[in-house]
Amino acid sequence: MTKTINITLKVWRQFGPDVKGRLETYQAKNISTDMSFLEMLDVINEQLTLEGKDPIAFDHDCREGICGMCGSVVNGRAHGPEKGTTLCQLHMRHFSDGDTVVIEPWRSRAFKIIKDLVVDRSAFDQIIQAGGYVSVNAGGAPDGNAVPISQENAEKAMDAAACIGCGACVASCPNASAMLFVSAKVSQLALLPQGKPEAAERALAMVRKMDDLGFGNCTNETECEADCPKEISIVNIARLNREYLKAGFLSSVI
Amino acid sequence: MQLDAKIPGGPLTEKWDRHRFELKLVNPANKRKFNIIVVGTGLAGGSAAATLAELGYDVKNFCIQDSPRRAHSIAAQGGINAAKNYPNDGDSIWRLFYDTVKGGDFRAREANVCRLAQLSTNIIDHCVAQGVPFARDYGGLLANRSFGGAQVSRTFYARGQTGQQLLLGAYSSLSRQIAAGKVTMFPRREMLELVVINGQARGIVVRNLVTGEMERHEAHAVVLCTGGYGNVFFLSTNAMASNVTASYRAYKKGAFFANPCFTQIHPTCIPVHGDYQSKLTLMSESLRNDGRVWVPKTPGDKRPPHQIPEAERDYYLENKYPSFGNLVPRDVASRNAKEQCDMGKGVGETALAVYLDFEDAIKRDGRDVIEKKYGNLFQMYEKITADDPYQTPMMIYPAVHYTMGGLWVDYNLMSTIPGLFVLGEANFSDHGANRLGASALMQGLADGYFVVPYTIGGYISGTTPEDVTTDHPAFKEASQQAEIRTRKLLSVKGKRTVDDFHKELGHIMWEYCGMARNNEGLDKAKTMIRSLREEFWENVLVPGGGKAFNQSLERAGRVADFLEFGELMLTDALARQESCGGHFNEAYQTEENEARRDDENFCHVAAWEWAGDDKAPVFHKEPLVFEHVKLTQRSYK
Ligand SMILES: Cc1cc2nc3c(=O)[nH]c(=O)nc-3n(C[C@H](O)[C@H](O)[C@H](O)COP(=O)(O)OP(=O)(O)OC[C@H]3O[C@@H](n4cnc5c(N)ncnc54)[C@H](O)[C@@H]3O)c2cc1C
Ligand code: FES
């Protein structure tokens, strides 16, 4: 049932990449529990604007949990307390009257803060550019049914492909590793016949890129899986490790 | 000006082949000397940028989001059509063509739609080759489902995330070209002006959304793939940044705007629940495959759904349209939901909702099967509403979803400005007055992978553009204009926020230019919009500065354009004195309350030319000629 709550927000405010930031406190009053978390921030921003203050910058677009644009650390958890939920899909009914809610940006060496809660995640794009594709040009592909793919593999590939590239895995990892992100793409393509020819090279190139960009190592903390809004499984990391070893082995014998 | 759609001669199904042969080619070694700007990285822009680069052109690609992977196309759920006829249920290219023309209520160009149907099969092949994990049957072959407006099963899907998977496919091809140095990517940029030199599109001015700087980019051709303008209604299923700005600025530089009043209201969305609401969420049309739509027979019946016995439920779509049932096209389904609610039979707190019930499907197929097909949609519904659709029927209501109108383009997808091409939802081309489900993804990808790569070559080889640099006076002027406008928005320092204006505009458009329209209301809305626009420029409050990351300023610019564009929609709606597809003028309906077309007077595309600020736009007509499809009153009974 709809009701309203009052909460205290502590929000990270930082004007630009190279200036110091700090937590500012705001009172969010009469918040309907049917609101989404971002709608609650909209309400605060309308108030700040009318008071002549600078509204809180945060990234968002689809507000349906699919574009991967939103994301902040809420009370220490990437995307907040609800399992398998992006920040835009988190609703205020999961908070209680009188709560204090701390909102901070993703923190990682590879993701620079642009403003407030907005970070630069272009490192993820660079990892995909290193090999997260099948090298085919438009035109000339064989019939879609030419190569059957077992339903099981197609489903597993889809499980991995569901990654939205939001960066929560990096934000929640004590080492700020991007292994879950990398492994999801490597797995998706390794599971499908179309991705096989380049599988070895792909795994090597993407992991190398990840390291170059300053992401940390994976030490099996599994925080990434716990906070991933799409519940991408760490089974993918094991698969990536296998692909990587295979690839390393192949490249050393050739 | 006489509009020439440049439709090639010859038999309908041979036109595209013949045209491809007749188009002049650009020498492969020369392609890299040509720069092409692609604005947008959705299905249309992503696929076009990647493919043009594969061919050897030098491409610059722009988007608003922080990464090309986040374009609004990512949100498409249900699927993509293709006339593969894998299920052997009677589909064919001809049937897809026919269904699309009919679904669009006979207001689309036959030749374009035929090409679209022909290319549909290539799209699936290419996407499979890219590693798109489409759903598969037990035997490992591609699975299909049905969508509205069709009696065959021709929709390919990847769970409820088809748009995401297709977009990530295009993004992967794009990433490969970025790595190869053939595409330079410019994320977090917003196009604010088109630059036209000697009558040709030669570049754009964008605002760098991080630094606030105006940047100039020149090219030999500009391809706009900037999506639809549904957010003119404030509440819609579109992503928050979806806008009309790029198209509208091109319109003001001479590109005609076609059929702006053709908007699609999608029947199955989660109903509005509060005035703080920022957007509406679609529940994919694919749900109508298994869900049954109903309302209580008695107006005002407030019992919870499971207490209403079978005999007291009205499955109005099944009763009224026995042969298509729950799968009637969107415009028909939406209007019927409104009609039921207008009669007082709406359900839920606001009584602006109808039920979409899966009880029978779960009984028939088991929860597992339903979960596999729609699991993520059910989950999304539950997150938003806190209701479990496995236990209780969903509540749904129509919401603004898609815009069939867009910049006018010819068969080559070129606008009335030479060198300006328009693809995807941003153009008007293939869906007439109503788009069928799963056809937008098909069109965006057909345009980007398979049409523009050819037709742009035809343009480039047929012209000898002079060398220009971004120091050209036209660039200076355009960038100054953008600068001045930005400063103006910041300097008003009024008392109302941008969102506040946007919401009011949305209310006006929804009330008077939404699911049902009438002349009086449209006239009234015009006056209301004008005064709202005036107030905006006197009283809007945009905090912060121009040379910084400033999301309020971004929104202000978009709303300013919506405030002008909304009026163009009303003008177009008033000029079209008939009902067709999504444009329903109450004065023109059949006895059964279906849209009544007037083929004698309105079988045309309305293309509007900008005539100057505060001047009425000039009307141009492209007559539609139907040689292969017989114009009939659409019937889904
Ligand atoms: C919720 C939802 C579900 C849908 N489901 C389906 C479905 O199942 N099947 C189907 O066929 N269709 C579906 N559609 C429709 C379909 O998704 C869209 O019509 C289609 O994806 C539009 O693609 P596009 O490439 O034209 O534009 P978009 O994907 O909207 O991309 C626009 C691009 O342009 C950029 N851009 C916009 N303005 C500017 C500017 N001023 N400057 C710079 N860049 C700019 C954006 O950043 C973005 O990259 C759905 C739509 C919605 C809203
Ligand atoms: S805004 Fe798109 S995932 Fe949250």
Image (spheres, coloured by chain):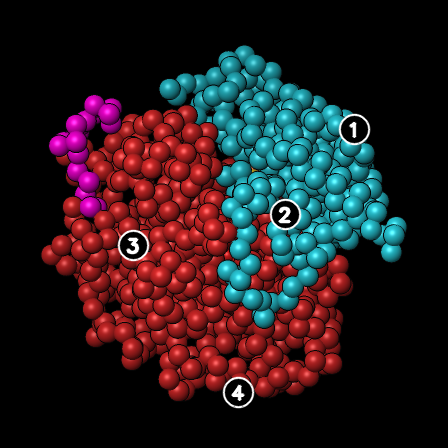
Chain colours: A cyan, B red
Is the residue under label 3 in contact with that under label 4 (CB below 8 Å)?
Answer: no
Q: What residue appears at the point 26 percent right and 62 percent down from the top-left corner?
A: B580
> Quick one: label 4 or label 3, which is nearer the N terminus?
4
Q: Amino acid at mark 3?
A: Pro
- Residue B130: % across, % down: 61, 58
Q: Amino acid at mark 2?
A: Leu
Is the residue under label 4 in contact with that under label 1 (CB below 8 Å)?
Answer: no
Which residue is identified by label 1? Answer: A219
Closer to the camera: disc 1 or disc 3?
Answer: 1
In this picture, which residue range is highlighted in magenta? Answer: B299-318
How many residues crowd mark 3 within 10 Å: few (<14), some (14–19), many (20+)? many
Marks 2 and 1, how far apart in space?
A: 24 Å
The quarter of the picture where residue B603 lies is bottom left
Closer to the camera: disc 4 or disc 2?
Answer: 2
Is the residue under label 3 in contact with that under label 1 (CB below 8 Å)?
Answer: no
Find residue B329 and name its label.
Answer: 3
Q: What residue appears at the point 76 percent right and 63 percent down from the top-left corner?
A: B181
Find residue A191 and name its label.
Answer: 2
Helix, strand or loop at label 2? It is helix
